[in-house]
Image: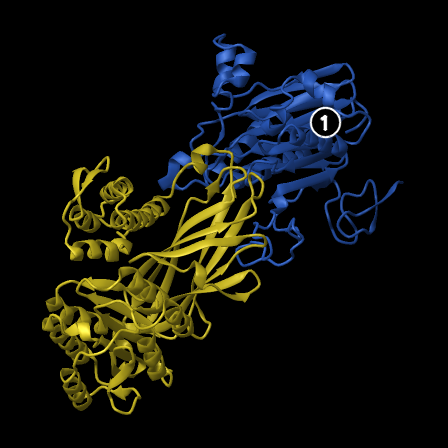
Amino acid sequence: MIMESCPECSSPVASQDRFCEACGRNLRLQRTPVGGPGSQWPPMCACGGEEFDADGFCEQCGRARPSARDRVEFVLPGVAGVSDRGKRRQRNEDSMAFGRVRGRGVAAVVCDGVASSERAEQASQTAVDTAADVLLTGLQAGMDAESSTTDSVVAANDAVGRLARPEAAEVAPSCTFVSAVVTDDSATVGWVGDSRAYLVAEAGAARLTTDDTWAAQLVAEGVLTEEEALTDRRAHVLSRWLGADSGVEAPQTVTFKVETPGLLVLCSDGLWNYVPEPEDLLEVLPRGVPPIEVARELVEVALKAGGHDNITVVVVQLRGGHGA
Amino acid sequence: MALDFAVEVFQNEYLPEGAADVDAIVTVTTTGVAAEVVSADAAEVVIVDTSASMAYPPSKLTAAKQATVAAIDALRDGVWFAVVAGTDTARVVYPRSRKLVVADSRSRAAAKQAVRALRADGGTAMGRWLALADDLFAGFEGGPRHAILLTDGENQHESPRQLTKVLDEVAGRFTCDCRGVGTDWRVAELRRIAEAMLGTVDIVADPDGLAADFRSMAASAMGKAVADVSLRLWTPEGARVVSLKQVSPGLRDLTGRRVESGPRTGEYPTGAWGGAESRDYHLRVRVRPAGVGDRMLASRVSLVGPSGEVLGQGRVLAVWTEDSALSTRISSEVAHYTGQAELAEAIQDGLEARKSGDVGRATAKLGRAVRLAHESGNTDTAKLLAKVVEVEDPRTGTVKLRARVADADEMTLDTRSTVTKRVGKG
């Protein structure tokens, strides 16, 4: 019997316990907080000032109080994520959520709020929270990963759609979506928009998603080459997204067997703009470190390259049949 | 207090990377009924120039007396008042006690009688007139203190330094509207007094117009419900206020009037306020540029009442962005008033050049003024300009100096160069 401690109340618990004897917490399920980092404001301004006015401006240097969303790090066993505002954007409109059901697997979601829509950060947070709920419930219930991925997209799309104001349909809150459901021996990736998933293993790396963008569509139709598409101004114009005006009914999905150890990387375009090809990613990926270190390093790569957009990276460890 | 104050800020808060100057138009508007103000809460001193020149032509003194009588008639019962006659010294014409008296039918009649008996004799020393007005106001604590100063000549019997000394001393203790009658007074001199005393300046070329003008000034002064309102500006560390100017209803530079009132905080006087008033201020703050994506409070603008209470508040923001579609957008309010300030400067420079015989510079400056007045729809100023220059094409500012210009037309243009057109109104 392996002794661990309850993440809620630190009481000793046994690894096979489903609930903590002391506080009643579900020990099989661990997940990132609903609502994201929420209101855990950093206590200090970058200038060292500690007083803020009612609108959140530093009484010393006048700068807006840093948001808890500016830099978010979550770590769970076998999965970790980092989300960063980057160096150029006013807000971090990316969100991430993930969880782990002991003995079943891991579910993770990354959404990137569409900057031209209103309340984009609320859209992405609502989407990851809603989708993670559906995926984790599916994992606990042993549901088929593909259909639970589709369910999560439908639920997230509805939830984001409800944020829209009828009088401002053209700026209805919207976001992209990429998810992963990883069990002992298989992984399912689902996506809408241009957030991506990469598979990285000893043998090499591969991109698992194809962007829902006009440029990607033109490449698929042979109108543009990959290189042309990258520099084309339409490179990031989404052809599919989540939100009131999306018309999306299902994600694209891919399911594959996990036979060897490796990493699954979910990310927003704030990362992949700088390392678009799987080989590029492989080159900068640190080896032999836990997922959180991998995520931190990848975000650092994007920041050093300019950090023009919000950057979110979630890294899931694939054990290749050695237990999720 | 019967007045409500609202502070609004108009600006484009988006700045390109590295930019430090943040511009904003701050609009202060009052609502509420100023009529509820108790008359006893106002004080009025009328200062009439009785120097020898007022007798030539005699209609000048007659008109000045009539105007003063009209102002006295406009005083409501309960207002504290006095009349001062100014020469190279200053003398209280009414009452005899050298103290403000309460207006009622008896005191108004006595004051009018004393005014009618005035004679013109002596010189001009406006600093002494203002100093006496200040003495009269000294015992009065109630509310708005207002003076009307009427003159027809230059400040000949004291040095500019003496006048400056008096202005430094009395500024902020009462407001003073200045009127020049005829064409022998100096626009720059009266403008200086009016600016220091937070009042207006205007020309009364035709003495017949004086009475109506005095009546309306007295009425407007008694409509002020709150005296001594200040704009309090907080700016972040490392920032400074480059300029603060009232830009509507007229131009008035308040930059030099700052009084430090706390850490990173200074206050600027705006004078007294009545009901249904609206004034615009152009604020420019220079901050330490933050990074792209950062958001900064460049200034917190508070309107502060006589006893330090905050009557309204607004925020001037700065957001650095690399989206040039955002940062190159120009706030129409800021652009409009920048143009109006430039217009005033072009007129004053142009008239100065014209006086010194520099035809080229005068033509260029006044042409520029014609164009600015045309572009901003400032038709009043455009009309005044047309009396000084022949306008060939207002769109390009192509003009010729007129050979003969009436002194009154030139002085009217100069005096009213600081009258701006309100943004976005027709």
Disc 1 residue type (three-letter): Thr
Q: Residue furthest right?
A: A1
Task: Tell me residue A250's x, y (percent).
Answer: 52, 25
Quadrant position of residue B360: top left
Residue A258 visible to an observer of this rendering: no
**The color chain A is rendered in:** blue
Left or right: B178 as drawn, with respect to A11? left
Foreground residue among A37 and B252: B252
Left or right: B81 as drawn, with respect to B74? right
Chain letter of disc 1 in the image: A
Left or right: B9 as drawn, with respect to A284? left
Q: Which chain is yellow?
A: B
Q: Is residue B142 above or below residue A175?
A: below
Q: Is residue B18 above or below residue B188?
A: above
Q: Is residue B389 above or below residue B169?
A: above
Foreground residue among A201 and B229: B229
Task: Tell me residue B421's x, y (percent).
Answer: 26, 51
* Colouring convention used in this rendered image of the protein: by chain
Assign a secondary structure to mark 1.
loop
Quarter of the image with the N terminus of chain B is bottom left
Q: Dot 1 corresponds to which residue?
A: A183
